[in-house]
Image: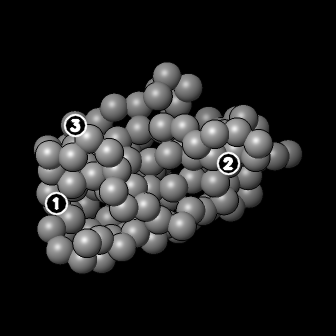
Amino acid sequence: QVQLLESGGGVVQPGGSLRLSCAASGAAFSTYTMGWFRQAPGKEREFVGRIYQNGGTGYADSVKGRFSISRDNAKNTAYLQMNSLKPEDTAVYYCAARSVGRLTFDYWGQGTQVTVSS
């Protein structure tokens, strides 16, 4: 079992940056693939990106080149660095953890709001 808590959301102007954090409690953080997802009002939740146990990353086309994911296993924390933010990035952002051998993300945080507006 792992519990996840996101932080770092807020209001930012277009073109600005934010860094979200996802703090995990529980055992064996380094064994999880960590993912970031978002859900805008009236829309379905969508994949943003993931970071594997070995540090490899993958991103949705909509954020590629602007967002980056990292992890600090010593701190049990994953990060989502968001640059060149656009109004369409406005959403609740969730982090999630996927256990080894699983195809789906099993554990989810409660989300943090990101609003991009002038």
Mark positioned earlier in the residue sequence (1 or 2):
1
Residue annotated with mark 3: 56
* Quarter the C terminus occupies: top right
| Quarter of the figure with the N terminus | bottom left
Q: Is residue 81 visible?
A: yes
Residue 34 visible? The answer is no
* Percent of width and height locating residue 52: 22, 43
Query: With respect to residue 72, does 39 lie above or below?
Result: above
Mark closest to the chain's N terminus, 2 or 3: 3
Residue denoted by label 1 = 30
Label 1, label 2: how far apart the Cα atoms are = 27 Å
Give the residue at x 47% y 28%: 60
Q: Is residue 55 above or below residue 18?
A: above
Amino acid, disc 1: Ser
Which quadrant of the figure has residue 108? bottom left
Q: Are marks 2 and 3 in contact (CB under 8 Å)?
A: no
Who's the residue at 63% across and 39% down the image? 44
SS category of the residue bearing label 3: loop
Q: How far apart in space, not on screen, are marks 1 and 3 (Cα)?
A: 13 Å
Residue 19: x and y, percent?
A: 51, 55
Instruction: Estimate how packed mark 1 is, as few (under 14), some (14 to 19) or many (20 or more) residues with alpha carbons within 10 Å.
Output: some
Q: Which residue is mark 2?
A: 91
For the point 60% across and 62% down, the residue is: 112
